[in-house]
Image (spheres, rainbow, N blue to C red):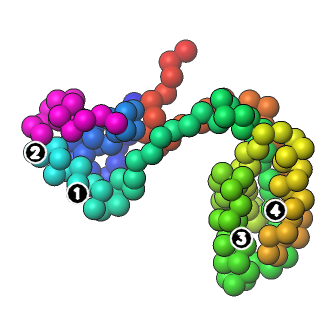
């Protein structure tokens, strides 16, 4: 499934789609796939990297096979939402390895965190020792995920049923 990104032509978009499906594809194979020769494909790839559209390459790990199958979403309310307090909270969040995602939310709470651990008891320790002690945390509410129905990156293909 290819998405349309403003400011990128069809070749750039095809490069992004191909890399999202296989980040280890060779430049030669990428060139064949998008219908350009190797040199212009490589130049486009370098430009997409230089412009910060492609921010890096990494292995995608299966958290379930690694024993990290406990996922909790945590609503966090802060007792202070001035810029300094937000910056202190954000800096603290970046230091907690178990926090997989953190989003500031426009709602009746301030942040939504995605926490991944090995078990409920490990999660409880992370909540008590790490999350609750982050700067300016007033209270939290936890929602435990029972099943991941869809977890994909920006351009990952949709599985057909």
Q: Which residues are magenta?
A: 24-38
Q: Position of residue 19 (x, y in %)?
A: 34, 39
Question: Does label 2 or label 1 sit earlier along the sequence?
Answer: 2
Q: Magenta span: helix, strand or loop, mainly?
A: helix
Quarter of the image with the N terminus in it: top left
| Left or right side of 11 for 80 | right
Spot the residue most to the top: 161
Question: Does label 1 or label 4 sit earlier along the sequence?
Answer: 1
Question: Does label 2 or label 4 sit earlier along the sequence?
Answer: 2
The residue at the point 23 percent across, 57 percent down is 47
Identify the residue position indicated by label 3 in the image.
Answer: 92
Identify the residue position indicated by label 1 in the image.
Answer: 47
Q: CA distance from mark 2 to mark 4?
A: 49 Å
Identify the residue position indicated by label 4 in the image.
Answer: 131
The label number, if any, that marks residue 39 in the structure image: 2
Mark 3 Cα shell of 10 Å, populated few (<14), some (14-19), many (≥20): some
Q: Position of residue 94 (x, y in %)?
A: 65, 65
């Amino acid at each position: 499934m290819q998405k349309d990104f403003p400011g990128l032509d069809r070749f750039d978009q095809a490069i992004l789609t191909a890399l999202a499906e296989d980040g280890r594809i060779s430049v030669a194979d990428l060139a064949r796939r998008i219908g350009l020769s190797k040199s212009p494909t490589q130049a486009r790839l370098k430009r997409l990297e230089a412009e910060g559209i492609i921010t890096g390459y990494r292995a995608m790990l299966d958290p379930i096979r690694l024993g990290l199958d406990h996922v909790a979403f945590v609503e966090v309310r802060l007792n202070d939402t001035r810029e300094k307090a937000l910056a202190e909270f954000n800096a603290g969040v970046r230091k907690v390895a178990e926090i997989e995602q953190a989003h500031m939310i426009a709602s009746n709470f301030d942040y939504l965190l995605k926490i991944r651990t090995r078990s409920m008891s490990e999660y409880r320790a992370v909540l008590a020792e790490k999350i609750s002690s982050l700067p300016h945390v007033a209270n939290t509410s936890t929602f435990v995920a029972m099943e991941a129905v869809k977890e994909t990156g920006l351009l990952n293909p949709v599985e057909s049923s």
